[in-house]
Amino acid sequence: MVNLTMSTPENETSEAPAGPAIPNFRDDERARARYASMIESRKKNFAVEHEGTVRRNAWAKRDELREDLDKAGADWERRKEAAEAAKEAYAKAFPHHIKKTRFVEPTGMENLKSLGAANKLYNAAKEAWLAAAAAESVIRRIEHNENQLDIELKKALERAPVVIKEVTESEKWLAEIHADEDLAKAKARAEEINAERAAYAKRLAAGTVSDEEIRLRAFGEADVKHMEMPLDGFIFARIETYGPKSYVILRDLRKQFFALPYDPRLEPLFAGVYDIARSGKDLAVRVHAKPNSREPFTLLDHFLKCNDEEEAAQEAHRQHQEWAKQRRLLPAMTELDEIEAQAMQLLTDFAATLK
């Protein structure tokens, strides 16, 4: 175990030169996610409203059809009674012209003898029968329309996703929802972020971005923090190089990343899991142990802890082992701040004990 007392200078002031403006990627992603969520929420609301409207329209038409069906049924009953009455009147006078479900027109002699009454009775029965048949036809048509309504409702619901997509991607609909002040502000913020990203990509392609800005943006986007101590259960995860400067990236068991300037003296530590822990006023580097045990916490244990799937953890561990064995010709960085210098001394001193 290697110990180092942390210095705590008082009244120390230094003004570093202003560096490049680096976005707050976490805040930016939250802003963009909020805007996307607001849009998605409005799309879902429209989808619910659209499908609700389709169903309500169908239900309203069904109510109308059933009301019409009730009226048509009552009309048919009246006309059927009238037809039966007319048929009975004709049958009473000319029973031989009634043939089960039909009736026959009277002869000319029968009409002459009855002074035209035969034709009147026959025509009355015929017209009443035709009226009843027409009323029954109305019922059949309404029933058909009701069945057709179910088919049309099913088709309309099947088309709904296409209709919803067309509407919610239209300029008109988007303009309407962005009349909302909160949504308009969220959109403006998202567009501002996108414009900044596009401007950076353009500068990067033109080769006008400094190595330092590239590094700071990469660290910001990956949420790689400045070196901190104490630090528990960390590994040396990878090395990132920006121009002449290289950094080793540490990862702890909470999946947090920290950057430390590279030094080849750190490489003996690449195959283990470590702590930088407090011991009174001092800091000490030690091998990370399993809970309630003195048994070392292995690299594989670390990858299993930091991955949701065992297979992925095994593959990450294999790749890390290959990476740790690689030979590197990278120079040590000499520009370290106080925390970095303290961490470097602790770690390199501890690494020397492993040889």
Image (cartoon, rainbow, N blue to C red):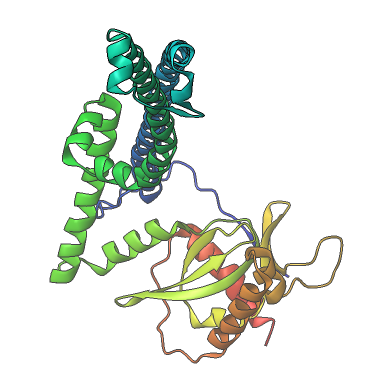
Q: In this view, does 138 lie to the left or right of 172?
A: right
Residue 59 lies in what quarter of the image?
top left
Number of numbered discs: 0
Residue at 47%, 23% in the rendered image: 96
Q: Where is residue 112 in the image (x, y as percent from the top left)?
A: 27, 13
Decide: is 137 above or below 221.
Answer: above
The quadrant of the rendering that contains the N terminus is bottom right
Residue at 40%, 18% in the rendered image: 68
Decide: is 111 above or below 61.
Answer: above
The one nearer the camera, 125 or 55, is 125
Q: Position of residue 248 (x, y in %)?
A: 48, 72
Decide: is 10 above or below 58.
Answer: below
Residue at 48%, 19% in the rendered image: 95
Q: Position of residue 337 (x, y in %)?
A: 43, 60
Q: Is residue 311 left or right of residue 148?
A: right
- Residue 303 appears in the figure: yes
- Residue 13 appears in the figure: no
The one nearer the camera, 137 or 40, is 137
The one nearer the camera, 332 or 164, is 164
For this orientation, the residue located farthest to the bottom is: 327
Q: Position of residue 355 (x, y in %)?
A: 67, 88
Q: In this view, does 79 lie to the left or right of 275?
A: left
The one nearer the camera, 74 or 67, is 74
Residue 149 lies in what quarter of the image?
top left
Decide: is 181 above or below 230.
Answer: above
Residue 135 lies in what quarter of the image?
top left
Residue at 67%, 76% in the rendered image: 272
